[in-house]
Amino acid sequence: MTEEWLSLSDAAKVLGVHPSTVRLWSDKGILPTHKTNGGHRRYKRNEISLWLETSRKSSEIEPESMMNEVVKNVRMQISEGRLQAESWYQKLDEDARAQYRLSSRSLFHGLMQYIATHGEDAASEAYAIGYEYASRARRYELSYVDAAKAFLFFRDALVSSVIKVYGDARVPAPQASEMYTKIHTFTDEILISLLQTYESLGNVNR
């Protein structure tokens, strides 16, 4: 029986991921790949099917366990150098900077709690975190724009870490997509709370 060969784009369709993801997995040696004399990637359908089946079984990991890896990766991403490049961070003194570095933990822990409880009490948790970010921004005289930028900096670090950890673990696209949706749903609620709280605190201080 003749072996069926797939191009990179065909393999991506079979796996249900973007072609760039297939390219990345191939470069890392995660996905079995072959090269033609001209240097083009080719994939055997039976190898791709077997890999996909194996990865599905090996990727049935509890979200909480995955998030522990995500938090570790986030800590590596949030370096002083990256923070120094942020305009809002440059406006803070050393005490304020230390508080903001610590405040990132509430976001990560809140998200882990949200996932572990399947969204129960999500509204109150999101409100509490949003209030924390808003009140801190007010205390250190940041504008509401800077307050939002600070939150989005930590949110983006979290999202990029999830993408990396889930990609490295070969989590199937539907499962990864579900996690991305949960993150954005929860963090969008936090951002709304942040802006509403910032506005209400301003009205109180008038």
Image (cartoon, rainbow, N blue to C red):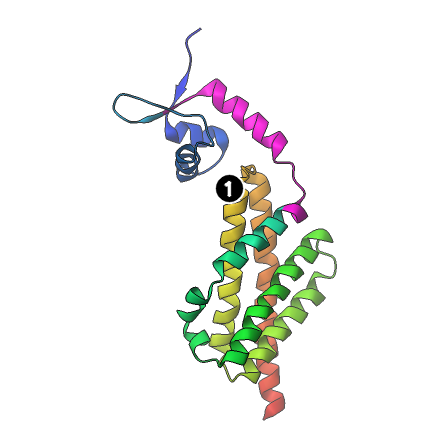
Mark 1 surroundings within 10 Å by alpha-carbon count, few (fewer than 14), some (14 through 19), many (20 or more): some
Residue 46 % position (x, y): 49, 18
Look at 60% across and 79% down and name the residue there: 135
Which residue sits at x=60%, y=31%?
56
Residue 42 screen position, x and y as percent: 37, 24
Q: Quadrant of residue 133?
A: bottom right
**Residue lying farthest to the left in this orientation:** 38
Q: Please name the amino acid that badge 1 sits on.
A: Gly
- Judging by the rendered image, the residue that carries numbered circle 1 is 167
Rendered residue at 56%/57% (across/down):
184
Front-lying residue, 33 or 194: 33
Q: Position of residue 168 (x, y in %)?
A: 51, 41
* Residue 158 visible: no
Is 53 on the left-hand or right-hand side of 80? right
Q: Per the image, is 61 magenta?
A: yes
196 or 34, which is in the foreground? Answer: 34
User: In this picture, which residue range is highlighted in magenta?
Assistant: 42-65
- Membership of 108 in magenta stretch: no
